[in-house]
Amino acid sequence: MIDATALSEKPVLTGPRVRLALLSIRHAAAFHTACQDPETRRLTGSHHDFTLAELQKWCAGSADRADRLDLAIEDRETGDFLGELALNEIDPPNAHGSFRIALVPDATDRGIGSEAIRLLLDYAFDRVGLHRVQLEVYDYNPRARRAYEKCGFEVEGRLREALFWDGTWHDVLVMAALRSRRGGSEGGSEGGDTTRGTDTDVELDLDVDLGTMRP
């Protein structure tokens, strides 16, 4: 039902302002800096303090993970690291996958996230052949929820008190986008192009799910 080779070939997805390229070791230092930002950690719910060595190992292994996509968000003009996203937890029989995204602090409130999400959704639906893409977002992040809704995600449910942060329990909202309900989100990457990229090596048990970061 899906084309698994679309996950292993590691595309480069280009929009008007951003480029999604294979997450590699050259992104590790900027990725690590973003992970140290207190607000980024709050919005992603990351209790684990990732070391540079951990992130170098994770980034270096992106090319070898054939069952998922881990992509860096880069400024199309400068090549600066703006964040990272992933399409993971692929369920081929049900054409279902999960999605996550995290931006560096300076990349927020600029429409960067929406452009990157639309590029990845287009690839997930049109190239991989997924029917459903799911994400999670914390109840204290309404800005992210609104951004996801503009890209075609809808709230489907709530995991009650699933995160303990700063002395308080918080709910996790489950959202999903369906290929059959793309509507106004379709065409968000008009004018973009897709080319193939490569890189190298290794493994780490790190996962940052859609506004949530989990070791």
Image: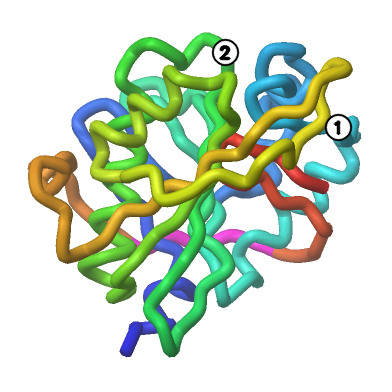
| Element type at mark 1 | loop
Q: How far separated are the C-alphas under marks 1 and 2?
A: 18 Å
In this view, the residue in front, 74 or 172, is 172
Mark number for residue 194?
none
- Residue 192 drawn at (x, y percent): 17, 45
Residue 211 is a magenta residue: no
> Where residue 3 appears, x then y in whole percent?
35, 83
Q: Can you tell which quarter of the image residue 42 is in?
A: top right
Residue 30 falls left or right of residue 174? right
Mark 2: give few (<14), some (14-19) or many (20+) Cα within 10 Å.
Answer: some
Determine whether, in the image, residue 136 is placed left or right of residue 187.
right
Q: Provide residue 86's location: percent of width, then percent of height.
A: 53, 52
From the image, tell me which residue sits under label 1.
Answer: 47
Q: Which residue is mark 2?
A: 105
Residue 85 is at least partly visible in this image: no
Q: Nearer the viewer, residue 11 or 44?
A: 44
Q: Main secondary structure of the magenta part?
A: loop
Residue numbers of the magenta segment: 196-200
Of the numbered discs 1 and 2, the one sitting upstream in the chain is: 1
